[in-house]
Image (cartoon, rainbow, N blue to C red):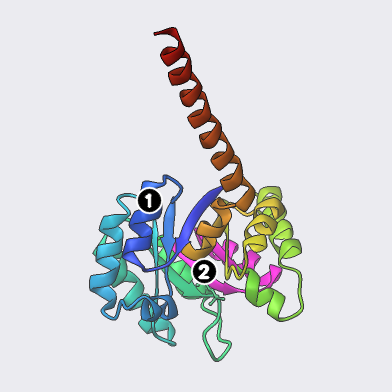
Amino acid sequence: MEIFLDSANFREIEHWLRQGVVDGVTTNPSIMLKDGVYGLEEGARRLCTLLGNRPVSVEVTTNDAKGMLEQGRTFARWAPNVVVKIPVVNECGDSCLGVIHTLSREGVPVNTTAILSFNQAILAAKAGATYLSIFAGRVSDEGNDPASIIRGVRHWLEEWGYPAKVLVGSIRAVIDVQSAALAGAHIVTIPPQFLSKMVDHKYSRETVRQFNQDAEKALAQISQYKTAAQ
Ligand code: E4P
């Protein structure tokens, strides 16, 4: 399974890249705003450089299909690792599958975003999307079970031979990462604060502390023996 960072915070991304656990980055206009990246092109180009050849998802910022297509083509020229994020529907409920299909046929990798149901996911896969972003937290907000959607979509993709990858976003707690991973997500995109929580454990700290203390005691014993032998 791959791990993406759901962030536009350069310092956090650099930190986690150095830890060797980051396979890509996802952003959206809210993340860009929160992390102080106000200039989309400059921010996206900087992220793409930082990530090397790993994918960086950049979301369109318009509600009409023609505008999405134009933005998608423009974003794709910014860097070879740009992935264009297109919502499955716009804010009026109009299908964006045509945009996803056209960009995908032109060779632009598309991350279909704001997916909240099994049916939306399979339609995006049929339209040619590279990534299917299932929003686990928002699925839960609606009283539905993200794990059963993730499991179902993963099974369906394999059953019918679609190459799209299940990318689980909208992570609201550490347990969501575990649930998504065990339900069969190909990728989970994680806000950096949860990665910090995932790696830490108070009993691990205590265990390491105990080992360090015993190592110090062993050294003290050696110097005691040396002194006695002199
Ligand atoms: C990632 O691709 C999504 O844009 C992001 O995870 C959405 O998260 P939210 O539901 O917390 O806004």
Q: Give yes or no for residue 114 being in the magenta stretch.
A: yes
Is 109 on the left or on the right of 181, as rendered? Answer: left
Q: Is residue 53 above or below residue 121?
A: above
- Identify the residue position indicated by label 2 in the image: 112
Looking at this view, is 186 or 203 the one in front? 203
The amino acid at mark 2 is Thr
Name which quarter of the figure residue 120 lies in.
bottom right
Binning the other alpha carbons within 10 Å of mark 1 as few (below 14), some (14 to 19) or many (20 upward) gives some
The amino acid at mark 1 is Leu
Is 106 on the left or on the right of 146, as rendered? Answer: left
Q: Nearer the viewer, mark 1 or mark 2?
A: 1
Q: Is residue 50 above or below residue 36?
A: above
Looking at this view, is 154 or 108 the one in front? 154
Q: Residue at x 42, y 67 (%)?
A: 7
Q: Is mark 1 within 8 Å of ligand 1?
A: no
Q: Residue at x 54, y 65 (%)?
A: 127
Residue range in magenta is 110-134
- Identify the residue position indicated by label 1 in the image: 17
Name, please, the residue furthest toward the bottom.
92
Q: Is residue 103 above or below residue 217?
A: below
Task: Identify the secondary structure beneath mark 2.
Answer: strand
Residue 23 seen from this side: yes
Residue 230 at x, y percent in the picture: 39, 8
Name which quarter of the figure residue 73 lies in.
bottom left
Q: Residue at x 71, y 49 (%)?
A: 159
Binning the other alpha carbons within 10 Å of mark 2 as few (below 14), some (14 to 19) or many (20 upward) gives many
| Cα separation between marks 1 and 2 | 25 Å
